[in-house]
Amino acid sequence: MKFSQVGTIALIGLSLGLYGCGGSDSKKAVKKVEDKVKEAVLDGIWQSQTHGFYLDINNEQFTAYDVTPSYCIKSLTLSAFEYEVIKQSSVFNQVDEIAVDFNDIKIVPIKFNRVEKLPEPCQSEHLLDHQSDVFNPLATFNLFWETYQTHFAFNRFKRVDWVNDYQAYSNRISADATPPEVIMLIDEILAELRDGHSSFVYAQGEDISYDPRGELEQSIYTSFYEQDDIDDVDDYFAIWMQAHHQTRATYFEPSFATLAPHNGKLQLNMLQDNIAYLNVSDMHSIIGDAGLEDVEIADDVAAIHDIMNQMIPTINGSQGLILDLRLNGGGHDHVAMQLFSHFIDAETVIGRKRIKTDDGFTEFFDIKVKPAPGERYLGPIVVLTSEYTASAAEVFSLALLARDKVTFVGENTNGSFSDSLPKTLPNGWSFALSNEQYQDIKGNDYESIGIPVQHSAPLFAPEKIEQGIDAGIEQGIAILK
C-alpha cells in the first residue's frame, strides 16, 4: 500500500493539533496517533540503497531478505531485530525514503527506498531456504560469489576478479558437489582475499577467516620452531602473552592504585616521570564479561563516558599519556568514537567513508565526532599499536591521526577498517565481507596495510622480554618525558 505525501502530512498535522489540549492524556493520545502514522507509512516493501537488503513490512510484522541479481534468501541478521526496533529507529528523510539505525551492525543508518514489490528472485525458484535440508551447491556458491561481486569494496587491492574468474571457480562446483567441497572452495577464495572482515561460518563454532597481513603471526611461528622447550604453539603464545603482561606491569608506579572501572577493559596506571598509561583491551563489552553481541552498544558507550570521567583528572595531571592499543582487536565503532570524544575540544572530522553499491560507490561522507561534555584531555599522546590493533581500534587510531600532539609507536595496525556486512547462505551457513572504504582526513586508505607508525617497536620481541624490556613503553616514555 502506498501513502501520498498529502495524506501523511494531514495525519501528522492531526497529531500536532492534539498538543493544544494539554495534560498527560492528550500527550498519550498524540503518541498513539504518531505511532499509528509511522506504522502505516512503514508498511510496504523497502529496498536498501547500498547493502543488498529488502524489508517486507506489513501490520507490525516484517521479513528481511538478502538479495543478489539472481538469488534471494531470508536475512538471518536483520530478521533477528524486533519490529519495534525497526519502527523506533526509522527516520523518514522523505515519504519514500527511510534511514534505519541498525547500530548493532553499522555505525551509520542504512537508507531504504520504497518499491512496488520484492524483486523477481524473491518470488521464484531462486528464493532460497536458509534452513533447507537439501544441499544446493550451485546456488550456495553463486549466492556467495554474486554477493562479493556486488558488495566487496576492495577489488582493486585483491587477487580475485569477480567477473573474469567466475568461470574458472564455478567449473569446480557440480550439481553433485558435497558440502566439504564447497567449503574448501570458499576457503580458497577467502585465503586469496585475506580480508580482515571476510569470514565464513559453516557450523556452530566452525568458521574460516584470514588475517590481511600475518607478519606477527609468522614471527611467532618462526620463533616457536626455533626453540625446543615447548611443544604446542598455542602454549608458546600463551606463555609469551603472560610474559608480555608481566613485563609491562614492571613499569607501573607501585604507589598508584590501578584505575579499572567496570570490568577493566580500560586500565589506567602511572609510569615514571609522571606519565599516564592507559591500556584499552577492547572496544566492546565494556560493562560486563559477555560476548560482543550480548551487550547493548548504548550501555557500552555510557560506560566509556563514565570511565573517562573518572580517569581524565588523573591524566590531566600527568606529563603526557601513553595509550596502548597493541592487543585491541576491535569491537564497535560507537565505542571508539565515544572514547575519542574525551580527547578533543571541538567537533572533529576524523576521516571519511563510502559504501559499495551495485554499480560503484556512494559519495564519500565525513565522519564527525563532537567533544564529550565535562573535563577532557588535550595534551600529548603516544599511541602504541601492533598488527593486532584491528577494526574499531583502527578507526579510533584513524581518529587520533586527526588530532594534534599524537605520535604512533610500535607496528602498523592490522588493516581491517571496513564494517563487516553479514549475509546468509542456505543450509544454515553464513558469511560476511567488507563493503566500506575508510580514508583519513588527507585521503589515505590504509586497508590491508594498516596505519603506519613514526617509531618502530615490535610487539613480539623475545630478546626484549627476556631482558624485562617493553620496547613500546620505553619509546613512549622517551618521547613524553
Image: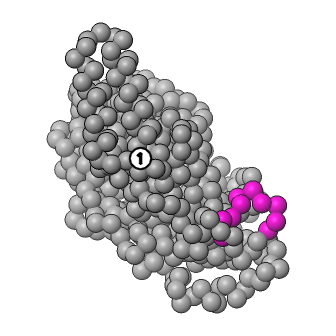
Q: Specify whether residue 163 is in view.
A: yes
Kindly identify the amino acid type of the residue bearing the numbered disc 1: Val
Disc count in the image?
1
Q: Specify whether residue 454 is in view.
A: no
Specify whether 395 is left or right of 129: left
Name the colouring of the figure: one colour
Q: Secondary structure at mark 1?
A: strand
Q: Where does the magenta region start and end?
A: 126-135
Of residues 138 and 58, the one nearer the viewer is 58
Residue 47 on image: x %, y %: 45, 59
Which residue does the image show at 22% across and 52% down from the upper left? 349
Specify whether 312 is left or right of 235: left
Specify whether 331 is left or right of 440: right
Task: Answer whether residue 128 is magenta in the image.
Answer: yes
Residue 130 on image: x %, y %: 70, 58
Which residue does the image show at 72% across and 86% down from the upper left? 172
Quadrant occupied by the C terminus: top left
Quarter of image, res 208: bottom right
Of residues 421 and 456, the one nearer the viewer is 421
Of residues 6 and 460, the one nearer the viewer is 6
Quarter of image, res 145: bottom right
Which residue appears farthest toward the left when viewing the image? 346
- In the image, is residue 310 above or below residue 109? above
Q: Which residue is mark 1?
A: 100
